[in-house]
Image (cartoon, helix red, strand yellow):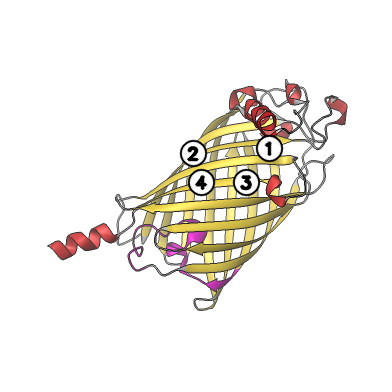
């Protein structure tokens, strides 16, 4: 009995993660387009699933705050802004199902707001004042307050090229709702010390079944993505009205590249990725940023 209790307690069934995304990490003085993002996640293993059909099921609760700015933060003339000022604050709940070791299906819903209600304007102005940066001059032209209700799905598939060392992961995703409508296809090639997808930090699946005997995962990732974008509220404003003072025309097709490094143990994951995107707005340029992700696993 003592052995069984010890075995159960050895599993790490929950995880907390924090992600920071910012172009300031490039150390090139840039502060434009996707200017900043904070993402908090709490994940736990669901106990309500048929173990004869699913290898694992993980529930994720997310709170995210993102804001977007044009190039030239000191210019207050609306005619000179190459993309709108915009902020979005949202909460989401998602469920990831693993039917086998190499397949994941994730789906969920997010609810949030844009505009002044998102707090993006206040946060950026406070931050720039605190560190001595120039005050952004154009937030009065931001995308107006609007409700964001979105449904999101992602399907991941792992293809092993060399057992434990090289694989290819495809990610097919879609979003539909009042905030974002798009389709994406990503391809990620990984090199290093790898785990099966249902136990990999790549999709935040270290918790739950298999976490007790998890071995350290270390890899480099090279990725390419192609997106079709029908609507983005941070660029085009609300689907239901045109009362935002400044909106831009979307580029319907968007390509992205990324390179990154991940290290993961039983209790901790660190990811660092460089992301590069073709221009999302006709009047803007290509843009890039770095994301830093820290995850800590808990025993429940």
Front label number (2 vs 3): 3
Q: Is residue 259 above or below residue 34?
A: below
| Residue 190 at least partly seen | yes
Q: Is residue 191 above or below residue 136?
A: below
Q: Secondary structure at mark 2?
A: strand
Q: Secondary structure at mark 3?
A: strand
**Which labelled disc corresponds to residue 232?**
1
Tell me the CA gap for discs 4 and 2.
15 Å
User: In this image, 264 relative to 287: left or right?
Assistant: left
> Is residue 195 inside the magenta stretch?
yes
Crowding at mark 2 (Cα within 10 Å: few <14, some 14-19, many 20+): some
Magenta stretch in the rendered image: 190-213
Q: Quadrant of residue 280?
A: top right
Residue at image point 66% right, 35% down: 67
Tell me the CA gap for discs 3 and 4.
10 Å
Question: For mark 4, what is the residue?
Answer: 18
Front label number (4 vs 2): 4
Mark 4 vs 1: CB contact within 8 A = no
Question: For mark 2, what is the residue?
Answer: 92
User: In this image, 63 relative to 210: left or right?
Assistant: right
Mark 3 vs 4: CB contact within 8 A = no
Q: Secondary structure at mark 4?
A: strand
Of all residues, the one furthest to the left in this rendering is 1
Residue at image point 54% right, 44% down: 152
Front label number (2 vs 1): 2
Front label number (3 vs 1): 3
The location of residue 148, given as percent across then percent down, is 58, 31
Q: Secondary structure at mark 1?
A: strand
Q: Earlier in the sequence, mark 2 or mark 1?
A: 2
Question: For mark 3, what is the residue?
Answer: 21
Along the viewing direction, whichever of 153 and 282 lies nearer the viewer? 282
Residue at image point 48% right, 58% down: 269
């Amino acid at each position: 009995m003592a052995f069984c209790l010890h075995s159960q307690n050895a599993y790490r069934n929950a995880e907390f993660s924090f992600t920071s995304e910012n172009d300031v990490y490039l150390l090139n003085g840039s502060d434009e387009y996707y200017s900043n993002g904070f993402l908090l996640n709490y994940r736990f293993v669901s106990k309500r699933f048929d173990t004869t059909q699913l290898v694992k099921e993980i529930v994720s609760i997310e709170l995210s705050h993102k804001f977007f700015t044009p190039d030239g933060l000191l210019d207050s003339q609306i005619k000179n802004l190459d993309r709108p000022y915009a902020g979005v604050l949202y909460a989401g709940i998602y469920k990831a199902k693993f039917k086998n070791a190499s397949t994941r299906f994730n789906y969920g819903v997010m609810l949030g707001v844009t505009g002044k209600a998102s707090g993006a304007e206040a946060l950026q102005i406070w931050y720039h004042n605190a560190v001595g940066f120039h005050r952004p001059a154009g937030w009065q032209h931001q995308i107006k307050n609007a409700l964001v209700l979105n449904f999101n799905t992602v399907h991941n598939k792992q293809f092993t090229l060399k057992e434990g060392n090289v694989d290819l992961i495809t990610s097919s995703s879609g979003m539909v709702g009042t905030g974002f409508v798009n389709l994406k296809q990503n391809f990620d090639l990984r090199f290093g010390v790898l785990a099966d997808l249902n136990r990999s930090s790549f999709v935040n699946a270290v918790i739950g079944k298999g976490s007790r005997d998890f071995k350290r995962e270390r890899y480099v990732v090279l990725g390419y993505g192609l997106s079709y974008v029908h609507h983005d509220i941070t660029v085009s404003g609300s689907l239901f009205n045109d009362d935002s003072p400044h909106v831009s025309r979307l580029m319907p097709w968007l390509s992205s590249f990324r390179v990154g490094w991940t290290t993961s143990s039983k209790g901790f994951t660190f990811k660092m990725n460089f992301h590069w995107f073709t221009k999302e707005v006709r009047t803007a340029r290509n843009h890039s940023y770095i994301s830093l992700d820290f995850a800590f696993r808990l025993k429940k």
